[in-house]
Image (cartoon, rainbow, N blue to C red):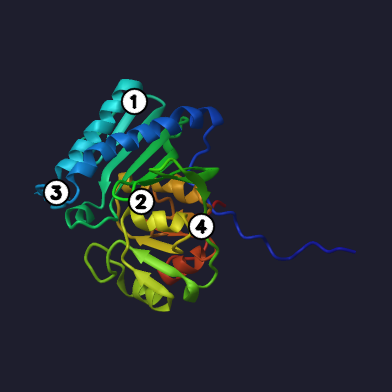
């Protein structure tokens, strides 16, 4: 006689991307490409041009590319969907109904101003079903390379400037010793603040590189890396990444193992390594999963 298993199944990891309908994807994915094009049209002529760099109140750099690209995207949203809300890094929040766009026009401004190709544009579309906004679509777009990822709960696709597109997904990795680990900056810097726990994880990894900002998540979603670490972020850094990584089959949490949208920070992995990474960073395995 078969006996019931005495071993409980592990809890299903929580997903932070809300589902989207086919009608929503038909409506909004083409518009997201329009926004990407508007941002690229501003950013490309300014890249490698010696653009003036200013400092914001928090001492982070900003350029005409940041401000111009966000202004161009806002103009398109206001024209097509005037009732939608907007949250942008450069020009703040505009209240709206039901849907909200979250814009980070140049994610990786330090990369942009040092002529590094790894900067990108982050765009999220969120929907409020009565319990607050949650992302349903996200884009990571790289102007210098002419490529973009657009993701939702059921899949992520890579689009190229030549018109080609294809589905992408994370690669399977089950051992830290086989993993490529990425971070936006080195763990010892004040910006990263990874501490000795991050150093221990990195020492075990097969490969470690500071190919960060939104590119680290691009690499993860397309099967080029296995772990991406960002202990301190802003909301507009996170919102677009959630649908892209989850659509590609990956897993993400905040640095403490919970909701990365509620406490903006990210540990993103291809999936099987996630609980081990949390453990190594000092977060109990399974934190942030539903009861």
Q: Mark 4 and mark 3 in contact (Cβ < 8 Å)? A: no
- Answer with mark 4 or mark 2, whichever residue precedes in sequence: 4
Q: Position of residue 136 (x, y in %)?
A: 46, 38
Q: Quadrant of the N terminus?
A: bottom right
* Label ID, residue 252: none
| Mark-to-mark CA distance, 3 and 1 | 36 Å
> Can you say whether 158 is above or below 282 in the image?
above
Q: Is residue 24 left or right of residue 84?
A: right
Q: Residue furthest front?
A: 162
Tell me which residue sits at (24%, 58%) in the image: 116
- Answer with mark 2 or mark 1, whichever residue precedes in sequence: 1
| Mark-to-mark CA distance, 4 and 2 | 24 Å
Tell me which residue sits at (46%, 55%) in the image: 222
Q: Secondary structure at mark 4?
A: loop
Q: Which residue is mark 2?
A: 263
Q: Secondary structure at mark 3?
A: loop
Q: Position of residue 224 (x, y in %)?
A: 45, 62
- Give neighbour class at mark 4: few <14, some 14-19, many 20+ (Cα, 10 Å): many
Q: Is residue 195 left or right of residue 177?
A: left
- Give neighbour class at mark 3: few <14, some 14-19, many 20+ (Cα, 10 Å): few
Q: Which residue is mark 4?
A: 170
- Confirm whether residue 239 shows in the render: no
Residue in front for this viewpoint, 264 or 146: 146
* Label ID, residue 96: 1
Q: Which residue is mark 3?
A: 49
Q: Residue furthest right?
A: 1
Q: Is residue 251 left or right of residue 256?
A: right
| Mark-to-mark CA distance, 3 and 2 | 36 Å
Mark in the foreground, 3 or 4: 3
Q: Mark 1 and mark 3 in contact (Cβ < 8 Å)? A: no
Mark in the foreground, 3 or 1: 3
Q: Mark 2 and mark 4 in contact (Cβ < 8 Å)? A: no
């Amino acid at each position: 006689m078969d006996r019931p298993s005495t071993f409980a199944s592990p809890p299903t990891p929580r997903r932070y991307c809300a589902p989207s309908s086919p009608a929503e994807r038909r409506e909004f994915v083409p518009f997201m490409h329009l926004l990407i094009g508007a941002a690229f049209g501003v950013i490309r002529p300014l890249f490698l041009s010696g653009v003036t760099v200013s400092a914001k109140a928090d001492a982070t750099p900003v350029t005409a590319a940041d401000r111009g690209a966000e202004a161009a995207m806002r103009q398109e949203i206001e024209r097509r969907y005037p009732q939608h809300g907007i949250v942008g890094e450069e020009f703040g929040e505009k209240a709206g109904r039901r849907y909200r766009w979250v814009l980070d026009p140049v994610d990786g401004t330090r990369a942009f101003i040092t002529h590094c190709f790894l900067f990108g544009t982050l765009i999220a579309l969120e929907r409020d079903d009565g319990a607050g906004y949650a992302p349903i679509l996200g884009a990571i777009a790289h102007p210098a390379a002419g490529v973009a990822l657009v993701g939702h709960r059921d899949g992520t696709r890579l689009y190229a400037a030549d018109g080609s597109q294809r589905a992408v997904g994370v690669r399977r990795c089950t051992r830290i010793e086989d993993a490529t680990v990425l971070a936006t900056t080195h763990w010892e810097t004040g910006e990263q603040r990874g501490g000795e726990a991050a150093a221990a994880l990195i020492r075990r990894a097969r490969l470690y590189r500071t190919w960060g900002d939104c590119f680290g998540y691009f690499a993860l979603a397309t099967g080029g890396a296995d772990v991406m670490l960002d202990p301190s972020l802003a909301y507009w850094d996170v919102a677009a990444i959630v649908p892209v990584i989850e659509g590609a089959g990956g897993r993400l949490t905040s640095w403490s193992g919970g909701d990365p949208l509620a406490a903006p920070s990210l540990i993103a992995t291809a999936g099987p390594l996630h609980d081990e990474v949390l453990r190594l960073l000092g977060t109990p395995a399974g934190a942030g999963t539903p009861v």
